[in-house]
Amino acid sequence: MATTPSRSRRTPGRPPKARIDQRARLLDVAIGLFAQQGIAATPLSAIARRARVTPALLHYYFGNREQLLDALMEERLLPLLAPLHRDLSTLADAPRSQIDAFVRDLLQLLADNPWLPPLWLREVLGEGGLLRDRLMRRVAQPVSAKVRDAITRAQARGAINRDLDPRLLVVSLIGLTMFPLAARSIWSRVFDAEDIGPAEFARHTIALLERGLEIRDD
């Protein structure tokens, strides 16, 4: 007698892969639109249209915009930024190698995720940016004191220039990396610099940080 084929059983509590892939794709579409036109100017219906799904499906996965932004933080931004926190928190032990690692890791991260610099400018630095409070609460505030103390300890033993303000060093590091890549479409054309990639940019930035301009009055 023929037997009925048995159905493969899904592990309880684990969503099927197709559902995970669909959710990740919708999040990618949302991030692209947020970086391109801003969060406030991107209703969920626009994300659904770009992803070619119904608004009901988007609501099924993310509920509302606040929950979508929470997902963006938890599933994209925080995992991306975690290695950078490790680089900065160990500055006191080996400042040169850790700053080198921070710059290289950040530039590679930005090259791999070109949506991040414009999103950062719009939604973190821009007045009224809708990611500012989340980044301050989840990233800047927990990490800033550790980084400041690590820099202070390195300065105390002469490993970092004592004239630097520990509170401003991270600001300078971000300013030398995030901002230039956000404006890449401008300076790469102005200076005919389309050939500059993450490795070349990192080499320039690290040289600037370690040795400065070495200006001499002749």
Image (spheres, grey):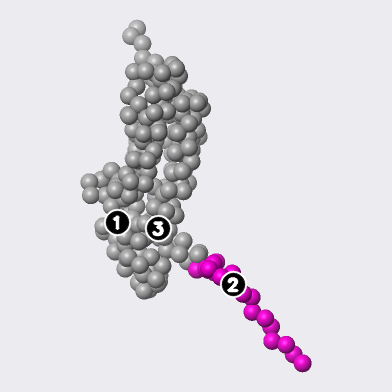
Q: Residue furthest right?
A: 1
Q: Residues within 10 Å of mark 3 (few under 14, many from 20)?
A: some
Q: Tell me the quarter of the image containing the C terminus.
A: top left
Q: Tell me the quarter of the image containing the N terminus.
A: bottom right
In the image, taking residue 6 as reference, residue 155 lies left or right, namely left
Q: CA distance from mark 3 to mark 2?
A: 24 Å
Q: Tag 2 or tag 3, which sits nearer the N-term? A: 2
Residue 42 magenta-drawn?
A: no
Q: Residue furthest top?
A: 218
Q: Tag 3 or tag 1, which sits nearer the N-term? A: 1
Q: Is residue 218 above or below residue 41?
A: above
Q: Residue 42: horizontal and vertical position, in percent?
A: 29, 60
- For label 1, the residue is 39
> Which residue is depicted at the point 40% across and 33% down?
146
Q: Are marks 1 and 3 in contact (CB under 8 Å)?
A: no
Q: Residue 19: horizontal and vertical position, in percent?
A: 50, 68
Q: In front: mark 2 or mark 1?
A: 2
Find numbered disc 2 in the image and state the secondary structure of the residue it sits on: loop
Q: In front: mark 1 or mark 3?
A: 3
Q: Residue furthest left?
A: 127
Q: Is residue 207 above or below residue 40?
A: above
| Amino acid bearing label 1 | Ile
Q: Tag 1 or tag 2, which sits nearer the N-term? A: 2
> Which residue is depicted at the point 39% across and 71% down?
60
Q: Are marks 3 and 2 in contact (CB under 8 Å)?
A: no
- For label 2, the residue is 10
**What range of the chain is rendered magenta?**
1-19
Residue 129 visible in the picture: yes
> Which residue is depicted at the point 53% across and 68% down?
13
| Amino acid bearing label 3 | Ala
